Image: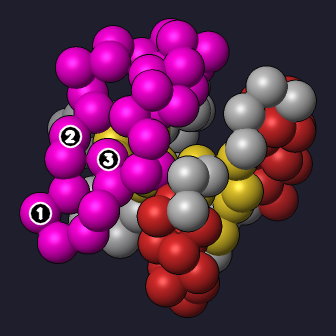
Amino acid sequence: MGHDYQSQLTQLLETLQKKLPIKFFRLSDIPEAVNWAERGGIAVHENFHTKRRYSFHVISAQKEKLEEFCSLVKLPPSNIKASEFYRFWHLTWSPFPPPVKKKRPRGRPRKNPL
């Protein structure tokens, strides 16, 4: 994750932590994230299931806390799904717009540039 996105995410999570029990976990720390979520906290970890950049998996054993999270970050509560393998609820969250790619010029380059 780029430094700029990391600092933006840190600021966003610090704001949310004032209202909810949220912790951020790296992809390598998913077992700890699951443990935190099963104990009633909200775990946010890097998402490896999506090709969209800067997407996160948000999990908690308490659906009400995820509903409150959705309200704070302006997501529809219908995004919350039950986990098939664990005892928690989850959703995918993309807090930042995807990076804008520069468009390549179409056609052949001019022989005599202006």
- Residue 17: percent from left, percent from top: 81, 37
* Residue at (19% x, 47% y) in the render: 82
- Reply above or below: 92 against 47: above
Q: For numbered disc 2, what is the local secondary structure? A: strand
For the N terminus, the quadrant is: bottom right
Residue 92 lies, with reference to residue 113, above or below; the image says below
| Along the line of sight, the residue nearer the viewer: 89 or 113 | 89
Residue under circle 1?
Answer: 84
CB under 8 Å between discs 3 and 2: yes
Label 3: which secondary element: strand
**Residue beneath disc 2:** 81
Rendered residue at 20%/40% (across/down):
81
Query: Could you tell me residue 113's position as x and y percent?
Result: 51, 35
Residues packed near mark 3 inside 10 Å, few (<14), some (14 to 19) or many (20 plus): many
Which stretch appears magenta? 60-89
Residue at the spot of label 3: 89
Q: Which of the 4 image quarters holds residue 8? A: top right
Label 2 and label 1: CA atoms lie apart by 9 Å
Where disc 1 sits, the SS reads: loop
Q: Nearer the viewer, residue 44 or 100?
A: 44
**Looking at numbered disc 3 in the image, what kind of residue is underneath it?**
Trp
Where the C terminus falls, by quadrant? Answer: top right
Is residue 66 located in the magenta-colored stretch of the structure? Answer: yes
